[in-house]
Amino acid sequence: MGNEPQAAELEARASLPGRNQDSTLLSIRSIAKTFGKHTVLHGISLDVAEGEFLTILGESGSGKTTLLRIIAGFEQATSGEVWMSGGRLDPLPPYRRRVNTVFQSYALFPHLTVEENVAYGPRVAKLPAEEIRTRVGEALAKVRMEGFAKYKPSKISGGQQQRIALARALVNRPKLLLLDEPLSALDANLRRQMQIELKTLQREVGITFIFVTHDQEEAMVMSDRIALLHAGELEQVAPPDEIYSRPATAYAAQFIGHTNLLEAEIRNSVARAGGLSWMVQLPDGRATFSLRPECIRRAQGSDAVSVARFRARVLDHAFHGASELVRVQVGDSQILTVRTADRGRLRGDVELEFDAGDAVPVRGPKE
Amino acid sequence: MFSRAYKVTVSLPPVLWGAIFLLVPYALMFAYSFWSVSESQTIVHSWSFANYGELLSKPVYHQTLLRSAWIAARVTLLSLLLGYPVAYLLSFHSGGKKNLLYQLVIIPLWVSYLVRAYAWKTILGTDGVLNTVLQYFHLTHHPLEFLLYSPFAVVLTLTHIYTPFTFLPIFASLEHIPRNLAEASHDLGASRVETFRRVILPLSVPGVLAGATFAFVLSFGDFLAPLLLGGSSGIMISNIVVNLFGASYQWPLGAAISFCMLALVVLLLWVSERLERKWAYS
């Protein structure tokens, strides 16, 4: 699928909400990275707009951290360029970039107090003492840690260290803030709380965030756009709702939320897969479709041609709080997952349907 | 968790060892330092501070004590100046060759102390390697006399011998520093030099203190290097102690001097321990 990431990227640029090309802050151009014989990134291109919250989403080994480290300046790309505000960024050492990083393990200086940690950047920049004090106070207030100024990092909790790491980066007023899985060490509740706080904070300060995570839910909650990275290539770059409802690839469809992948044969504008058939506007041939479990429902008795109706047998069901995931078999071999809010209603032989438009054609999995 | 009998059995050997070979001899020595020697060369078990008084009143003793401390201080400084950069380079910038280079630094420790001290004798002597080379290139016309049998020779030799002892704890403390702290520092705008000054150096202070303590304590009590290379001007306090316990048969005075040295070393260890605790961060 050599050229496909570029196509995804063009699509993404076009769909930047309410922004034009002039507001591009960071431009990643054909970045490739090789460690020995192992290629980690295959020519990544991506534009990030001023004030945007972009998430680089990918599994471990997808190259997301390497990409972040190239932007920060800790790694040199094997080829390609990085531009920021109209100037080349990649030849600069990390300490000359107006980019700050929140590290996965926070990397707070253990010999300095919370306050001294936050003051590190301004002190290195030789700002006047008065301004340093004001800025550090503001930064600590922003992350609600004023009361901990004199503590050593080892004396505060993980979530608090996380806030200090954030304050230490923001105090420098960077143009771009990089966050490398900053929430992965926190427990689930604190994590959800921090997701919302981070998003709110980002809107307040208006700094561009590039957030790296392997957690698709986190990416959905926080991002303006998600760049889905897989095996060193961009699968799709799009806002969360779009990447969910119009996944570009089978991988994207599966990685973000649950889905049913249908391998269909198209003939005369009718797609057939297992015991299913539905109307499409695509040329004849083979194609893969993604059909979300919540798009399948109990048949309502409609005869519209845009609705695909079918009979199925319920195999098993799993309770998921507000909804239930039910596995059904259609025909001899096709198994579908259905999400339904009517708990306990889908049992035995049932008649189901979905809107043909909800079966989204996606680029098939890589061979 | 463990039975009382088990705990006693396990801890008995080290306790006995410590008692028999450390506490009892020290107590005996301490007692000796208050006794005296009679005309007929027997130990008189009467208690007095006379030996400590002699130590303070006779310049040869307290001056040698101070000179030994001064030599040890110079050795400490030099071995830090040599050991720290090597440890830093090895820890941060040696790439895949770290283990090999580490072994190279350690190798001198495998060679007998005596061999290394004698090696300096052949290098520094009037007919030694250094003087021969200097004269061959006409840099001097006469062999340089101050090279051997001088405090200089002692400091040089002790520095050579004890630098690995300062290198090791410094290297260990540098290895202990999380690498992402240096990255975080660069990220916050600090250059390499600034990162070293603000992050690496402060975090390696415990190692520096441990290394400095090793170098000082070991060289302060050294007697072979001054014996072989020190001459009369490079004599150190241990040489005097050896002499008092040997030929001149002045055990009580020797014991008093030994106790002053011990007190000094213990004081130093205490200070260094306090400082290390102050600088420890985790």
Image: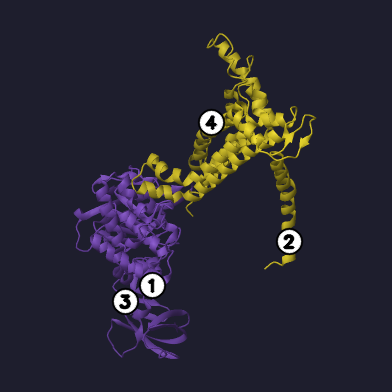
User: As shown in the figure, which amino acid type bears the numbered disc 4?
Assistant: Arg
Q: Secondary structure at mark 2?
A: helix
Mark 3 to mark 1: distance in Å?
Answer: 15 Å
Return the residue at label 3: A358
Do the residues at discs 3 and 1 belong to one chain?
yes
Disc 2 crowd rating (10 Å Cα; few below 14, some 14-19, many 20+) is few
Discs 3, 4 touching: Cβ within 8 Å:
no
Do the residues at discs 3 and 4 belong to one chain?
no
Discs 3, 1 touching: Cβ within 8 Å:
no
Considering depth in this image, is A177 or A301 the residue closer to the camera? A177
State which chain disc 4 sits on. B
Disc 3 crowd rating (10 Å Cα; few below 14, some 14-19, many 20+) is some
Chain B drawing hue: yellow
Q: Secondary structure at mark 1?
A: loop
| Camera-side mark, 3 or 4 | 4
| Camera-side mark, 3 or 1 | 1
User: As shown in the figure, which amino acid type bears the numbered disc 2?
Assistant: Val
Mark 1 to mark 4: distance in Å?
Answer: 68 Å
User: As shown in the figure, which amino acid type bears the numbered disc 3?
Assistant: Asp
Residue at 61% over, 34% down: B219
Q: Is residue A162 above or below residue B91?
A: below
Return the residue at label 1: A257
| Camera-side mark, 1 or 4 | 4
Return the residue at label 4: B74
Q: Secondary structure at mark 3?
A: helix
